[in-house]
C-alpha cells in the first residue's frame, strides 16, 4: 500500500464537482494507484480536523477540496500545511478571479449549483420527458423534443439521451429497424427539430448485441447478431441519414460523454440556422 496514494476529496456540498474533476485529473496519469476517501457536506472546522487526523496517518495523502467559505478553506489549507499534507483547492482562485472580472462579490454559498431555480426545474422536466420518450415511446410527441436520436439497436441511444437530459435537453430516441420504422411526421418534416443519427462499426455491434442476448438469456434471434445482417443494417441506416440530410456520429470509439458533446455542438449549429 506504500505506493498507493490516498486521495481525500473534501467538499462542502454533494462532492459531485470534485468527483468529476478528479476523474479528469487521474485520466492524465496512466500508472497511478490510489484509494479515494470522499467527504461531502463538510462545513465545520471539527469535521475538517477529524479528516486531517486520519489523512496524517498516511504517507501518501493528497487533499483536493471544493469549499466556498473562505475562512473554512483557509483553515483546511493551514492545518494541512502544518501536517505536511499536499492540499489543493479547486474553486478558490477561480471564484476570486471571476469576482474581480465580474466586479461583484461571490455568494460563497455551499450547494449553490443545486439551487431550485428555473434552470433546475427545466433540467428535471427534460429528464422526465426523455425517460417518457425512450426507445420510440410517445413518438407522436417527437416534435416537442430539443433533440431526436435515431440509430439501429445498441448504438447507445438511451444512455446518450439520459446524459443529454441531464444537460437540459428534451431528447427522444427512435430505434431504426428500417426507414419504415420512422414516424411519418418525421419523414414529412425531417427538420422539425435537431435530428442526429448514431452509427457504429458492425463488428463492434455484434459483440454488443451478443452480450445483450446473453444478459436476456435469449438464443433464438440469430438474425439480430448475424454480422452480414448487421452490416446491411448499418449501411441502410447511413443511407437513411443521408437521405434526410441528418448529421450522424460513429460512436464506436466514443464514450457517451464524447458523443453527447458532439450532439450538443450539432444542436447549437441547428439552432443558429433556425434563427
Image (spheres, rainbow, N blue to C red):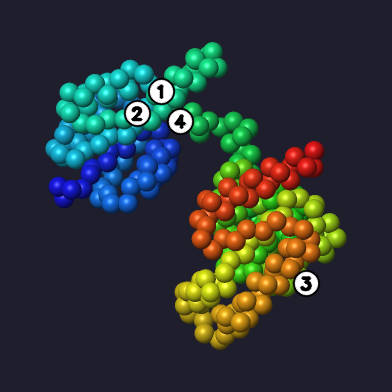
Residue 222 shown left or right of residue 188 in the figure: left
Task: In the rendered view, tell whether residue 240 sits above or below residue 220.
Answer: above
Number of numbered labels in the structure image: 4
Find disc 4 in the rendering and name its residue.
Answer: 111
Find disc 2 in the rendering and name its residue.
Answer: 89
Task: In the rendered view, tell whether residue 203 sits above or below residue 42.
Answer: below
Taking depth in this image into account, of 187 and 235 the one nearest to the observer is 235
User: Residues under labels 4 and 2: Cα distance?
Assistant: 16 Å
User: Residues under labels 1 and 4: Cα distance?
Assistant: 18 Å
Question: Residue 252 bears which disc, if any?
Answer: none
Which residue lies at the image location 28% right of the left edge and 34% below the top edge?
A: 63
Q: Are marks 3 and 1 in contact (CB under 8 Å)?
A: no
Q: Is mark 2 on a helix, strand or loop?
A: strand
Among numbered discs 3 and 1, the one appearing first in the sequence: 1
Among numbered discs 1 and 4, the one appearing first in the sequence: 1
Find disc 3 in the rendering and name its residue.
Answer: 180
Indicate the position of residue 194 as horizontal and vertical percent values.
Answer: 73, 50
Which residue lies at the image location 73% right of the left edge and 57% below the top edge?
A: 246
Indicate the position of residue 179 as horizontal and vertical percent values.
Answer: 76, 70
User: Residues under labels 3 and 2: Cα distance?
Assistant: 55 Å
What is the quadrant of residue 183 in the picture?
bottom right
Find disc 1 in the rendering and name its residue.
Answer: 93
Task: In the rendered view, tell whether residue 207 sits above or below residue 75.
Answer: below
Task: In the rendered view, tell whether residue 92 sits above or below residue 167.
Answer: above
Q: Are marks 1 and 2 in contact (CB under 8 Å)?
A: yes
What is the quadrant of residue 150 in the picture?
bottom right
Amino acid at each position: 500500500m506504500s505506493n498507493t496514494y490516498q486521495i481525500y476529496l473534501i467538499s462542502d456540498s454533494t462532492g459531485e464537482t470534485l468527483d468529476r474533476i478528479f476523474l479528469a485529473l487521474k485520466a492524465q496519469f496512466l500508472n497511478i494507484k490510489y484509494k479515494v476517501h470522499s467527504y461531502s457536506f463538510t462545513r465545520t472546522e471539527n469535521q475538517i480536523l477529524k479528516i486531517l487526523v486520519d489523512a496524517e496517518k498516511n504517507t501518501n495523502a493528497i487533499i483536493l477540496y471544493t469549499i466556498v467559505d473562505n475562512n473554512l478553506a483557509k483553515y483546511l489549507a493551514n492545518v494541512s500545511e502544518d501536517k505536511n499534507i499536499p492540499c489543493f483547492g479547486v474553486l478558490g482562485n477561480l471564484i476570486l478571479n471571476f469576482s474581480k472580472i465580474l466586479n461583484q462579490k461571490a455568494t460563497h454559498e455551499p450547494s449553490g449549483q443545486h439551487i431550485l431555480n428555473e434552470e433546475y426545474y427545466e433540467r428535471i422536466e427534460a429528464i422526465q420527458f426523455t425517460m417518457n420518450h425512450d426507445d420510440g415511446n410517445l413518438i407522436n410527441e417527437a416534435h416537442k423534443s430539443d433533440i431526436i436520436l435515431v440509430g439501429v439497436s445498441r448504438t447507445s441511444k438511451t444512455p446518450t439521451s439520459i446524459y443529454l437530459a441531464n444537460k437540459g435537453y428534451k431528447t427522444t430516441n427512435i430505434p431504426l429497424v428500417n426507414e419504415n420504422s420512422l414516424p411519418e411526421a418525421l419523414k414529412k418534416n425531417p427538420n422539425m427539430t435537431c435530428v442526429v443519427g448514431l452509427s457504429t462499426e458492425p463488428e463492434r455491434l455484434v459483440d454488443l448485441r451478443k452480450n445483450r442476448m446473453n444478459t436476456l438469456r435469449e438464443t433464438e434471434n440469430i438474425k439480430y447478431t448475424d454480422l452480414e445482417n448487421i452490416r446491411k443494417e448499418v449501411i441502410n441506416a447511413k443511407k437513411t441519414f443521408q437521405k434526410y440530410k441528418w448529421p450522424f456520429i460513429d460512436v464506436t470509439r466514443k464514450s457517451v460523454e464524447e458523443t453527447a458533446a458532439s450532439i450538443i455542438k450539432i444542436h447549437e449549429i441547428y439552432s443558429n440556422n433556425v434563427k
